[in-house]
Image: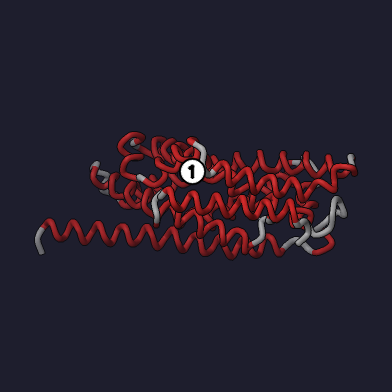
Amino acid sequence: MSHGSKGILTTSRSGLGIATGLIFTAALAWGASYLLMGSMTPSEMGSGMGPPGLPILGISMMFSSLTLTAMSFFVLIWVVGMVAMMFPALVPIVSIQYLAMAGRGVVSKAARLGGVVAFLSGYLALYAGLGVAAYLVVFVALQSGAFIPSLSPYAYAAAGGVLIATGIWQMTSLKDRCLKNCVSPVGFLMTHDERGVKGALKMGAEHGYYCVGCCYMYMFVMLGVAAMSIPSMAILAVVVTLEKVVVKGAIWFTRLVAIGFVVAGLVFLLRPGI
């Protein structure tokens, strides 16, 4: 076997190993998400605030206080959910990062895997921060509904507004700019390449920034409208993976998703409780 073909085989095996590891981790996270959400008994879910049937009210007790325990439990569920939803879409960038480290002379597989773990840790740190922000937003919204009952009838309108806003956001320059950085792993590494574990951690955080810019409204739909249900997570995971890995930011796809969110939002506004 020639040196060139051996290199290609090694590259293929490395890429396959990284992809398998990420998908396996995502599968474990799906199972953990199911168990964590299932750990909340019916008596712990729902508080009677607002109109019946709005999904977010089903997990309202998760946002009952600003204690460290309550927030930590939510952020744990949130981060595990992000692993489940986002790791399949990270296969290209993480595979190329792993191979780039080999190209720079990092011979040890343990060192390269350490770089991958650092990259993913930096990435998830951004989503953990988004989870804290999400918790605070939902806590304030639910408390407002409790102390100002007159706001409760507008809960469906708020959900519809989130869906419509998500559709509009799909067509903004911020979404487009962040998506371009997400769908071009080679381009990202050429402009953000850092060495060592600290550098990998920084790279992961920078990639997480672009990913949050691409997907944060999806996350608020999942939380505020669909109450972090497993089906909603699965649907959004498919959308994210198609958007980043399959169609690679194609305009027709982002516009199609935008139309879907706007239509869903109008349904919430015109046919509340359907």
Give the image location of residue 183, x and y in percent: 39, 47
Give the image location of residue 149, x and y in percent: 90, 44
Frontmost residue, 91 versus 231? 231
Give the image location of residue 48, x and y in percent: 87, 54
Quadrant position of the C terminus in the picture = bottom right
Q: Residue 34 occupies which quadrant of the picture?
A: bottom right
Q: Is residue 262 left or right of residue 159?
A: left
* Residue at (40% x, 55% y) in the render: 247
Give the image location of residue 4, x and y in percent: 13, 56
Above or below, comparing residue 102 to residue 199 in the picture: below
Frontmost residue, 208 versus 155? 155
What amino acid is at disc 1? Cys
Label 1: how many Cα within 10 Å (few below 14, some 14–19, many 20+): many
* Residue at (39% x, 35% y) in the render: 199
The residue at which mark 1 appears reads as 211
Q: Is residue 137 left or right of residue 115?
A: right
Disc 1, SS? helix
Quadrant position of the N terminus in the picture = bottom left
